[in-house]
Image (spheres, rainbow, N blue to C red):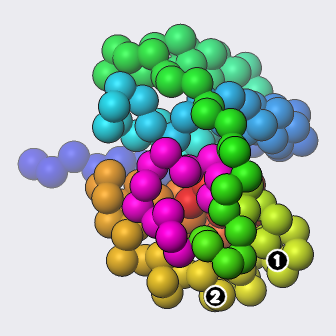
Amino acid sequence: MKQRFEIIPREFDHTESLEAFYSLLSLSRTYDIEYGKELSNHFTHGLIAKYRLGASKKRMEEWSHSYFKKTPTNHSLDPWVPSESKINKDNWKDFLGKKLFFADYVEYFDGEIALRGIEETVNKYATEMFPGMAGALLHSTIHLGWGIDIKSPRIVSEG
């Protein structure tokens, strides 16, 4: 017999959870988007899912601190590598696919989104970037989708 799952809506302190969510989300750039050479950091995805499923402030904090300590694959996360500000409007295509420039792209797209907004920035750049977004089991596409879904310029830049 096939098991059925019942989704039971529950009330929770949305304001407290929302504040905790954004506070914890700000920690995402403490760690690199990948760790252990080729594993994807799913902190942002997990935190969004927990928030959207109604996790309490306490539960999100406990999970976040546990994830930062050791991921489900029993690895430690790698630290965020700061941008060297190498990406600009004239050379943004030159470094596509080179993980070493991830923080530089994030910095560049932070600026583009601040200038143009999420929708215009995605429409301007996505077509040329989508072919390279299939790596890491579509991690960047998932990240971009979550960023658009919760209207987070920060997460869209990372995607």
Q: Which mark is residue 140?
A: none
Q: What residue sits 69% from the left and 44% below the top? A: 83
Please give the residue where the numbered disc 1 appears in the rendered image: 117
Q: Position of residue 49 (x, y in %)?
A: 56, 46
| In magenta segment, residue 104 | yes
Let me know if residue 67 appears in the view: yes
Decide whether residue 27 is among the magenta residues.
no
Estimate how packed mark 1 is, as few (under 14), some (14 to 19) or many (20 or more) residues with alpha carbons within 10 Å. few
Left or right: 17 as drawn, with respect to 94: right
Nearer to the camera, 128 or 48? 128
For the point 71% across and 76% down, the residue is 89
Q: Quickly name the residue at label 2.
A: 123
| Marked residue nearer the N-terminal end (2 or 1) | 1
**Vertical comparison of 34 with 128: above or below:** above
Which residue is at a point 32% across and 22% down the rendered structure image?
73
Q: Amino acid at mark 1?
A: Gly
User: Of helix, strand and loop, which one carries label 1?
Assistant: loop
- Residue 63 versus residue 80 in the image, above or below: above
| Structural distance between the alpha carbons of marks 2 and 1 | 10 Å
Considering only vertical position in the picture, is 82 above or below 134?
above
- Residue 106 quadrant: bottom right
Residue 23 location in percent, x, y?
A: 82, 33
Q: Quadrant of the C terminus?
A: bottom right
In this rendering, would 60 be left or right of 38? right
- Tag 2: residue type? Asn
**Residue 63 visible in the current orientation:** no
- Please tell me how crowded label 2 is: few (under 14), some (14-19), or many (20+) other residues with Cα within 10 Å: few
Q: Which residues are drawn in magenta?
A: 93-105
